[in-house]
Amino acid sequence: MVSAVGTLGPPLALLFRPEVLALVVSAGVCGLAAGAVARLGPAATVALLAPLALYVDPMVALTAIIVAGTVAAVFHAEPAGPSAPPESDMPSAPGGTDRGTAAAVGSLAGAVVLTAALSMAGPVVRLGPAAFFWVAIFAMSAAVLTASAAPMRALLSLLIGLLLSTSGPDRSLGFPRFTFGRPELLTGLQFLPVILGLLVVSRVIRAVVTASAPATEPDAARSAYLGPRARAPLRTPEILRWGAFGALTGMIPGAGAEIAGRLAPPADEQGAQPGGHAPTPAAAGDVARHAGMATAWLPTLLLGVPADAVTAIVVGLFFMKSMAAGGRTALQQGEMLSGTAVAFLAAAALLIPLWRLAGALGLGALRASRGIVWPGVLLAALTGAYAAAQSLFDVGVLLAVGVVGYALLAAGYPLGPALMGLVLGPVAEQQFMLAMAGTRWNVPDFLLQPPSLVGALLTAALWLLSLAVGLADRGAGQVAPGAPGRKP
């Protein structure tokens, strides 16, 4: 552990360079504006900042992305998992300063876990193609089964993402497929236009179509940040219990902070505890969510398999920079893992002052006129899409995928599984081909390998568990309206 802590020195030195520190603080402010004003979730915020990876040092870009996504998550007040809805019915800042502190505590706990995990990189690297293939399949299954919508809708969303990932050269033989005679598609769809269209443009379209943001009085908005619940004390038992729960569940590939976000106590359901104890503060859920958001980077950094939508974007970005399958060649370097821990330390340091700043300014009041923000968001998306290859064709892809994303949102389909399919489809395909080539295309030999057996059993167990839970819920009657993680 001491040697692991020692590896934090270089990324800390990089962070405190004046130009890097200014960029990271600016990313935190962008996360505040995106989450508190535009009501963009962490994934959409990260997508807007993703073009940074094309122009700055990868470690600097990763730090800025993590800080912006973490800040946006607490102001947006929703889980950051792969199928988190773009907007939550829960008020964006119901817990005030207490929730900002809780998010910082969760991020700090996640940074500690990431630092302790530095010694795990060696054993994980030795996993072969069959194991990585089944990890990808498990992650896609988890993304479907933990989605906020019905599993069949989430599965269809996943299939759409897989379909988008098939355009371009075959990853085993190199033959072009689904190019439709367009030379721009010979290398496949550019990742940045697709994610910006799916996560950002779709929500801009929905905001324009619905245009139903209710007016918010400044005093009410200010009290939402700094009201009585904002001063509810954080209790150590809740911090430890929900922090540990979020950190553990956040490591599950494909689920990430989704599980912690669903099972943590929501802000509007904090009743008195048995035995006459005081109600659990809303901040307990923020500790769990942000601890899970941090540890979700472990499967990403060690396996190249994302655990949530934010890490899926990062894996896709490493694909863009011609890394190995899943980005493992670069992501397994020790400085990347230690740098990610430092990024969450920076996020923890920024969350409290940014939360207090939001309370002082009453940013919630600006949501009454947040329509003026959407043109800027759309312009940022158009610029990022064009920056990928300086191609107007990519701008057309951005708008087309945005329309598809809006259609999915309007029909109640989650976007997270589509993003996971877009990123994990190539990983699963390439690792499957490598594993089959190693067995000379003998399917029984492939399936009877210990990694394949374990992976297949774990994936089957996940589906069976989900089926059993669904049948139990149906047998016991519908979950009460408003229950966390359930949609009517």
Image: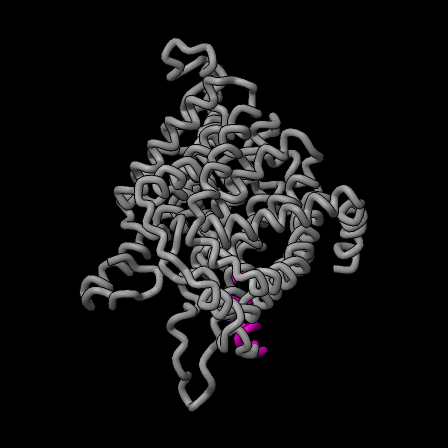
Figure check: 161 above or below 210: above
- Can residue 452 be seen in this snapshot? yes
Instruction: Give left or right: position of 393 versus 341.
Output: left
In the figure, residue 346 lies in which quadrant? bottom right
Quarter occupied by the N terminus: bottom right
Quarter occupied by the C terminus: bottom left
Q: Residue at x 61, y 61 (%)?
A: 357
Give the color scheme: rainbow, by chain, secondary structure or one colour: one colour
In the figure, residue 271 lies in which quadrant? bottom left
**Type of secondary structure dominating the magenta stretch:** helix
Q: Position of residue 325 (x, y in %)?
A: 55, 31
Residue sitting at the far bottom:
276
Is residue 366 one of those drawn in magenta? no
Looking at the rendering, the stretch of residues picked out in magenta corresponds to 234-246
Q: Position of residue 438 (x, y in %)?
A: 51, 27
Instruction: Give left or right: position of 413 versus 260.
Output: left
Is residue 242 one of those drawn in magenta? yes
Instruction: Give left or right: position of 30 versus 221.
Output: right
Front residue of 83/461: it is 83
- Can residue 122 be seen in this snapshot? no
Q: Residue at x 68, y 49 (%)?
A: 25
Q: Residue at x 51, y 64 (%)?
A: 286
Q: Residue at x 29, y 36 (%)?
A: 407
Front residue of 354/149: it is 354
Q: Position of residue 79 (x, y in %)?
A: 45, 56
